Image: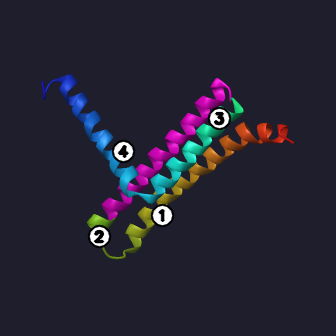
Amino acid sequence: MKNSFIGKRLQAFVYAFRGAYLLLKTEASIQAQTFIALITIIAGWYFKISAIEWMFQILAIGMILATEGMNTAVEKLCDFVHPGHHERIGFIKDVAAGAVFFVALAAVTIGFFIYIPKILLLF
């Protein structure tokens, strides 16, 4: 069963779950983003956002967490390959962080589109 198609998929799920657990346990950026995600989920329930708004919000949360995870993997790999400061390694790390920035900017924009009109209705 271990080398079967299903066995390999189950093992891949175990590795993915372990990776998500390690990210949540050890990485402050993932912990902060997860906290923000929980706040937006609570806000979604409070403001009774639509199904389409939920889809955009969940997509934004997933993209942020996935990109943060990839950024962490790139940083750890760079630190493993070249522990000291190196200009090219710094460039690679900055580009990975830039990818997180782009996704975060998109997520904030989605959040504004969803929540600003709802917040304005409170006043």
Q: Position of residue 100 (x, y in %)?
A: 52, 53
Mark 2 or 4, nearer chain start: 4
Nearest the eye: 3 or 78 = 3
23 to 7, vertically: above or below: below
Number of the front mark, 4 or 1: 4
Mark 3 or 4, nearer chain start: 4
Number of the front mark, 2 or 3: 3
Mark identifier at residue 82:
2
Residue at 60%, 36% in the rendered image: 57
Q: Position of residue 63 (x, y in %)?
A: 51, 42
Q: Is residue 69 visible?
A: yes
Q: Which image quarter: residue 1?
A: top left
Mark 2 or 3, nearer chain start: 3
Please tell me whether mark 1 sits on a helix, a strand or a loop: helix
Q: Which image quarter: residue 91?
A: bottom left
Mark identifier at residue 20:
4
Q: Amino acid at mark 4?
A: Ala
Q: CA distance from mark 1 to mark 2?
A: 15 Å
- Asked if the magenta segment contains residue 52, the reply would be yes
Q: CA distance from mark 4 to mark 1?
A: 23 Å
Residue at 40%, 50% in the rendered image: 24
Q: Do tag 3 and tag 4 residues touch (Cβ < 8 Å)?
A: no
Q: Position of residue 32 (x, y in %)?
A: 51, 54
